[in-house]
Image (tube, grey):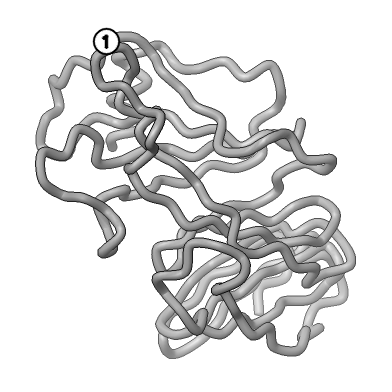
């Protein structure tokens, strides 16, 4: 995988805090992204116990021997008060679940006005716009998945919650972003630790070893 290739090339990255979750992000998807003369295509997003979110570049697809000088990384946002406990990309937004039960979402593009291609690594061309911050659970959000028209979050409060597709898939700020959250469903007698879905069904697992 690209992650393994990156690790072999760069020797890994050190964040001084336990890594709780990771996901990959295709920065070329969506009409917001300028695809001419693309200098960066994929990044790995890292969520930390410290509440930090970082992104690091991955080699371009089909270029297994690509040489990226230096192991660059960039902070997505300022440090939050609670650990980042889950990550997922849905509808071309980056979603993060936190240990306080909240979920945040960011729109992203590669049009950072402060980016200087002559002095900065391509990772710094990215910018992330916080578009949502909502409380969906009473305990840490342990998992997020996406299938078809819905997103699902699972939590240590024994529940999962269904999220509808955002009203505006091109939103870049909190004023224009709106997303409906469905009711919570408690089908487990223990914290939900894993969740997966397709267009036909939802599968979840819990701390006691049950899968439903």
For image coordinates 66% across by 73% down, the residue present is: 211
Where is residue 165? Give x, y as percent. 50, 82
> Is 201 placed left or right of 40 in the picture?
right
Check the picture and name the quadrant holding the C terminus: bottom right
Vertical position of residue 64 compared to residue 31: above or below: above
Quadrant assignment for the N terminus: top left
The spot of residue 151 in percent (x, y) is: 55, 76
Between 68 and 195, the residue placed more toward the observer is: 68
Q: Residue at x 70, y 79 (%)?
A: 161
Q: Which residue is mark 1?
A: 69
Q: Residue at x 89, y 67 (%)?
A: 138
Q: Is residue 48 above or below residue 15?
A: below
Q: Is residue 210 above or below residue 22?
A: below
- Image point (47%, 69%), residue name: 171
Give 115 or 154, whichever is nearer the viewer.
Answer: 115
Residue 115 picture location, percent across and down: 36, 27
């Amino acid at each position: 995988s690209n992650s393994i290739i990156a690790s072999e090339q760069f020797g890994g990255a050190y964040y001084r805090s336990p890594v709780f979750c990771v996901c990959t992000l295709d920065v070329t998807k969506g009409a917001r992204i300028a695809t001419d003369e693309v200098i960066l295509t994929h990044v790995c997003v890292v969520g930390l116990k410290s509440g930090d979110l970082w992104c690091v570049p991955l080699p371009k697809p089909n270029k297994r021997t690509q040489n990226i000088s230096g192991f660059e990384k960039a902070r997505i946002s300022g440090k939050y008060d609670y650990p980042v406990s889950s990550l997922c990309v849905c509808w071309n937004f980056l979603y993060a679940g936190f240990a306080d039960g909240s979920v945040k979402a960011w729109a992203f593009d590669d049009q950072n006005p402060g980016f200087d291609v002559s002095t900065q690594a391509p990772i710094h061309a990215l910018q992330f716009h916080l578009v949502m911050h909502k409380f969906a659970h009473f305990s840490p959000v342990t998992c997020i998945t996406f299938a078809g028209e819905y997103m699902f979050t699972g939590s240590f409060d024994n529940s999962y919650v269904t999220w509808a597709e955002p009203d505006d898939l091109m939103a870049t700020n909190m004023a224009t972003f709106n997303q409906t959250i469905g009711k919570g469903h408690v089908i487990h007698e223990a914290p939900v630790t894993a969740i997966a879905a397709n267009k036909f069904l939802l599968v979840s697992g819990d701390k006691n070893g049950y899968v439903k």
